Image (cartoon, rainbow, N blue to C red):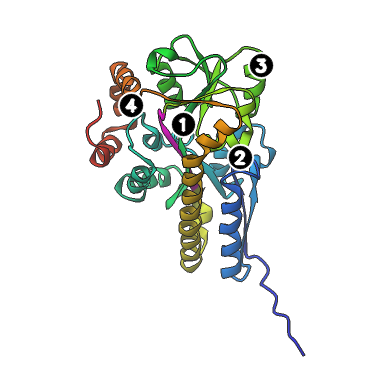
Amino acid sequence: MNVVVKSAEPRWKGRQFHVLPERSHQHRFLVDLWDGVRQETDGKLAVSVHPMSDGNPGGGPSSLDMLVRGEIEFYTINGNSLGGIVPPAEVQGVAYAFADSAAVHRASDGALGEYISRECAARGIHRFQRGLMENGFRQTYTKAKPIRTVADFEGLRIRVPGPSMIMDVSAALGATPVPIVLHEIPKALADGRVDGHENPLIVMDVQGLHEVTPYVSLTRHMWTGFNVIGNLAFWQSLPEDVQDIVDRHVTRAVAAQRAYTQHMNDTLAQVLVGRGMILTQTDIVTCRAKVEASGFYARWKEKLGRTAWSLLENEVGRLG
């Protein structure tokens, strides 16, 4: 006679929100992460994954507030949005600071990430030290003309998601930043509110935005990723052996997500050309020079604080 062994009823339950759709470069890896945790804890910790923040109309900032209040247990959020509560987290996106994604992850997995994690904990947030998922370097997409040099930004109204550093970078480059939520980009382009938008190539692909902007310019003006975070009180309620299991699965899932997303961003430019987009390699030297001349680095050294800035420069060299 075969005996069926059932997993235990969950002792702890949670919800994991993220802002992207189910077909995105986050969702499958978060599902895999929490499936692995559920299996290894014999069902004692059960966390469900909710794309598009489960329809939360407030989007990213509202979901972050929910996490801090303990209304959700886990969330993924880019450093610029996290900066609304934990200012040093925006250091992950400093314009033209990082040579490549590997440099970002070295800093985040090391002393700079440890500092951000401590600052998060002081505000009721547990940040997983090796939990920074890849989104990638942001590129620029336009309706009427490509961006060959920084001069081509002049007069353009560029959609941005809203966080202050992203707006500051766009303005420093000479554009007018216009905060608009992601799903409204096609309408904003159609009605003339904006002339273009910016995001990593993989977001362009996930959202199908190649259909509304014919030009893709590789401006690489800043990097963004998604910090896996949790409500600190909920995290501390878990026994140490369960925390160890979650840490291990976060590290594993995030490593897989980084590799997948980096590959997609490395190959999507030619895919988008195949879909009819016109690709331009932007002169990055002129872009960085204008950003520096605007006082961007001096402003953000003050906003992020000396500790975060020093740890950043330890990784990438002097800025500004």
* Residue on which the image places disc 4: 300
Give the numbered dot on residue 276: none
Circle 3 Cα neighbour tier, 10 Å, few/some/many (<14 / 14–19 / ≥20): few
Q: Is residue 55 magenta?
A: no
Q: Amino acid at mark 4?
A: Trp
Point out the frontmost of discs 2 and 1.
1
**Image position of 55 with respect to 5: above or below:** above
* Residue on which the image places disc 2: 20
Disc with the residue nearer the chain's start (4 vs 2): 2
Circle 1 Cα neighbour tier, 10 Å, few/some/many (<14 / 14–19 / ≥20): many
Q: Which quadrant of the figure has residue 207?
A: top right
Q: Secondary structure at mark 2?
A: loop
Disc with the residue nearer the chain's start (4 vs 1): 1
Q: Amino acid at mark 1?
A: Arg
Q: In the shown orientation, is residue 82 left or right of residue 108?
A: right
Q: Nearer the viewer, residue 195 or 247?
A: 195
Q: Amino acid at mark 3?
A: Ala
Residue 17's x, y, as percent?
60, 45
Q: Is residue 204 visible?
A: no
Residue range of the region highlighted in magenta in the rendering: 220-228
Point out the frontmost of discs 4 and 1.
1
Spatial CA span between label 3 and label 1: 22 Å
Q: Secondary structure at mark 4?
A: helix
* Residue on which the image places disc 1: 138
Spatial CA span between label 4 and label 2: 28 Å
* Residue on which the image places disc 3: 190
